[in-house]
Image (cartoon, helix red, strand yellow):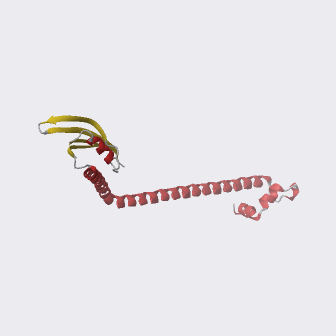
Amino acid sequence: TSNSEAIISAGLLDLAINSKFNYSNLISRQSVKNLSQTALRSKYIMTCIFCVVFVFSLWSYLFASTWRIDKISESIESEIEPIKDVAISVDKKRQQVRAVKAQFKKRGRLTEIISELYKYTPNTISISKLSYSSKQNRIFIDIRGQADLFYTPLDYMEDIASAKLLNGMQVRDTQQITQANGSVVIFKANCEIMDE
């Protein structure tokens, strides 16, 4: 074995195999065959060892990467856990704030409507009833009022046409009712306002 290793390491095996001159071979044919098989076996073993080491290294790298990702995920989840309840309560508070804002907005719009009625309604007309309803982004106003003269409600519609919100007011029904001390004109009017 020591001689075969020496022969292989000295390069005599390659020389014996590749030589064109049979008489120049210093090693017998059987020895050459045996040495060739030994060299091939050594190369095969080295290749197998390299493959095993490579696969193990790759598996170790992937395992380490997975373990690291798991640890980072656990760390992030542990940081998020205390905040979850806070986030839920903050979202509930946000919804409550939106609801309150919507209510104040509607009340603010109602205040603007009443302000315009007060500003554009003459002393000759008295409003006895005001109905306010909203649906999606529209507001519906229904008014019931009375006046002394039959044409006064029509003049009122012309006056209120210069208002910002109530400029679309329309008279629906006008009736003249006779009373003991004279007559009274009762009318109904409605208006639709687009709420922004």
Residue 177 vs residue 76: left or right? left
Identify whether 80 is placed above or below 163.
Answer: below
| Residue 26 placement (x, y as % from top left) | 82, 60
- Which of these two is toward me, 56 or 61? 61
Identify whether 87 is placed above or below 136.
Answer: below
Looking at the rendering, in which quadrant would you find the N terminus? bottom right
For the point 74% across and 61% down, the residue is 8
Can residue 25 be seen in this snapshot? yes
For the point 71% across and 56% down, the residue is 39
- Which of these two is toward me, 123 or 160? 123
Residue 123 vs residue 43: left or right? left
- Which of these two is toward me, 56 or 162? 162
For the point 28% across and 36% down, the residue is 172
- Which of these two is toward me, 97 or 177? 177
Can residue 166 be seen in this snapshot? no
> How many numbered badges does the structure rendering display?
0
| Residue 140 placement (x, y as % from top left) | 29, 42
Q: Quadrant of residue 152?
A: top left
For the point 25% across and 52% down, the residue is 118
| Residue 29 placement (x, y as % from top left) | 79, 53
Which residue appears farthest toward the left when viewing the image? Answer: 180
| Residue 24 placement (x, y as % from top left) | 86, 59
